[in-house]
Image (cartoon, rainbow, N blue to C red):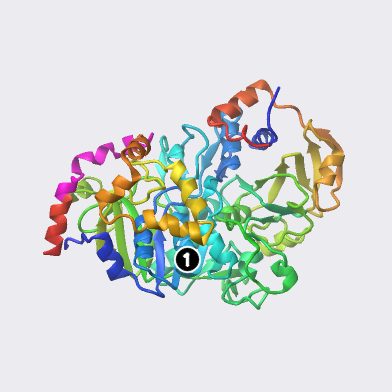
Amino acid sequence: MEYTKQEFMAVATGREIRDGELIILGVGLSMLAGYFAKLNHAPALRPFTEGGIYGATPVGGLPWGIECNRISANATSFTNAIDALGFLVASGRADNGVIGAAQVDKFGNVNTTGIWDAPPWKEGRYIPPRVRLNGSGGANDIAVGCKRYLIMASHESRRFMERVDYVSSPGYLDGGAAREKAGFVGGGPSAIISTLGILRPDPETKEFILDAYFPFTDVEEVRENTGWDLKISPEVRKVPEPTEQELANLRTVDATGSLRKKR
Amino acid sequence: MRNKLISLQEAVAAYTWDGMTYCNGAALPVGSDSIVFGVEMARQGRKDLNVICHCGSQQVNLLGAVGAIRRVEVGFSGLEVYGFAAGLNRAVTSGKTQIEDYSNGAMAMRLFGGAMNWPFVPATVNTFNDQQYCSCDEPDQYPCSKKIPLITDPFTGKQYGAFRTIRPEVAAIHVTMADIHGNAIMLGTEWNRFEMSRASEKVVLVADRIVDTDCMRQYPNLVRIIGEVVDAVVYWPFASYPQASCGLYDSDEEQMFYMNKMMKTEADTETFCQTWVHGWHTREEYQALIGREKIDKITDTATAFLLDPYRKWIKTDAEVEELEKDARG
C-alpha cells in the first residue's frame, strides 16, 4: 500500500483522537488529522476552530485556512475568538487540540515564531529573527488551556532540538514540575507525532521519549534525526500500517491530495 | 441616524494619518478583511503605522512590504496554507518593522479589555514563555518584565500575567453587509470584529454589500456591529479580495500565491503595486482588473446559500450610488 510520510503522520495523529472529545483544530495537517478521525473512528467528535466555527466538515478539500469557505459551508454555528479560544480553550474546557511545530524541544515546547542565529535566551536580548515564521496564532492558547494536546512536526534534527530558539507555545517548560508551577489550566502535550514516529512524555521528568516508530523507519534513524539524546521506551513498538479503510477515509477528507504531494 | 456612506478614497483621507495606531478587521488571513482599505492606505502613502491585528492577512503583508509599518502587534502574521507573509517578514527581518507577538486569544482579550475601558486584563495565557519574555519595545531586557508583568490575584494570592488593553485610534472592519447607518451583519466567523468595533475610537466599515435597514430589523440578533459605534461606511464589492468573504466569494488561490511571491522583494512589490495599488480608482475598474473569469470562479462558492435570507434587501450598484450622492448632500 502506498502512502506518503505526511499521510502516515495524519493517520497516526488521528488515531490519538478519541470519540466524543471537544477538540480544537488548527490549519492544514491538524485539520486533516481531526476530520480524518471523525470520519474514521470518532463520529461523535466535536471539532471547532479558533475563530469559532462549529459543527462543520470541510468540503472541496483541505481548507486554505481555518476560516476558509471550505470549512464554512455546513457549520451549525459561527461565533468568535473570545468564545472559542477564551470560553472553551483558555478556560480549560476543551479536551484536546492539535498544533504544528517548526521546532520542538525535548519537553514539548514549540516554536512557530522565528529562527535566530543567536536566540533571545542565549543572547539575553531580543533582536529580529533571521527567518520570521508565523507567530503562535491560537497555538499558545491551545497549549496552555486544553486538557491535553497533540503536536505534529516533521522529524528532522534541525526541528527536534535540545532547546528551541523561542517558546511560542509552552509544553512542559523545563520539565519535571515546571508546568505545574506555572499554573496552566491544561495538562500539556500528550504526544508528538512526527514523520517518523510517536514520542510521549516521561511521567516524572516530562522529557519526550520514543514510544513508537513508523514501519518505514527504525529506532536508529529516529535517533539520528533528533537533536537531543533521545531515550527509547523499553516497550518501543512499530506503529501498525494504515489500513486501506484508514487511507480511504483520509483521502476523502484530503480531497485535493495535499498530503500526497508532499514527501 | 445619518447616512454614513463615504468613498474609499475619502475614508482613507479622513480617517488615517501617518504615525497612527491602526487596526484591520479581519477573520484570519484567508477570510474577511478590509484589504482594499489597506491598499488605499498604501496608495495614499501612509507611513510610520502602529498596526494592531490578531492576524496580518494580505493587508498587513502589503503595508509591511511597502515599508508603511513601524510596529505591529500580532497574533499570527502568516497566510496559513498560502505560506509565510513574505512582505511583512521582509520588513521584520530587516529591522524596518518591529513586531510584538501575542497569541490570537490574547489579542481578542486585549480588545475586549479596551472595549471595557479597563487598564489591563488578567492573562492566563502567553505567560512563562517567550511571548512574555521578548518585547520589541524593551529589546535589551530578557526576560522582559514589562510586556506582560506578573500580578497577584487578590483573592487567592496566585500569580498571573497582565495584558495591556488595546484602544486603536481607527479600525477598518470588513463586513458582509451594512446599512447606510453602519449596522452590520457578518457571515462566517466574526473573529474579534465585535470587540474591535467597541474598542476603537473611530470605526470605518468596509462592506461587500449595502442593504436596506429593514434587513437589520428582520435579523436584529445578527447585527453584531451597531451604527452607534460606526463613523463611516464604504461600499466595496470584493473588499477582501484576494481573500474570501463568506457567502460571497472564495479566496483567489492564484492571486494569493502571486501577491505573496511579489512581496518578497522591493522591486517586485513595486511592480505589483503599479497594477494592484495604483492601477485602478473605481469599483468598476477594480472588478475589471480582477476580471470576469476570476469573478465567476470565486463567486461560485459553496457558501453562497448563506446569503439567501438577505438577498431581497441588497441594494444595486445604481441604488448605492444614489445613496452616496445623498450622503454627500
Q: Nearer the viewer, residue B316 or A182?
A: B316
The spot of residue A180 in percent (x, y) is 71, 60
* Quarter holding residue A221: top right
Q: Which quarter of the rendering shows the N terminus of chain A?
A: top right
Q: Secondary structure at mark 1?
A: helix
Q: Quadrant of the C terminus of chain A?
A: top right
Determine if residue A220 is in view.
Answer: yes
Q: Given the image, on which type of amino acid does mark 1 rest?
A: Arg
Q: Chain of mark 1?
A: B
What residue do we see at 75% from left, 69% from top?
A122
Asked whether, in this view, residue B239 is left or right of residue A66, the answer is left
- Asked if one can make out residue A234 in the rendered structure from this viewpoint, the answer is no
Name the one closer to the observer, B19 or B191. Answer: B19
Q: How many marks?
A: 1
Secondary structure predominantly adopted by residues drawn in magenta: helix
Whether residue A178 appears in magenta in the rendering, the answer is no
Q: Nearer the viewer, residue B157 or A261?
A: A261
Q: What residue do we see at 56% from left, 60% from top?
A: B89
Residue B292 x %, y %: 31, 39
Q: Say which residue appears at 34% left-offset and 45% top-offset.
A: B290
Q: Is residue A254 above or below residue A82?
A: above
Residue B88 placement (x, y as % from top left): 52, 61
> Is A260 rendered above or below residue B45?
above
User: Is residue B316 within the magenta segment?
Assistant: yes
Q: Residues within 10 Å of mark 1 (few under 14, many from 20)?
A: many
Q: Is residue A178 left or right of residue B56?
A: right
On screen, residue A177 versus residue B111, left or right, reads right
Check disc 1 and report the residue beneath it: B110
Q: What segment is highlighted magenta in the picture?
A: B301-319
Whole-percent x and y of residue B195?
39, 61
Q: Is residue B17 above or below residue A84?
A: below
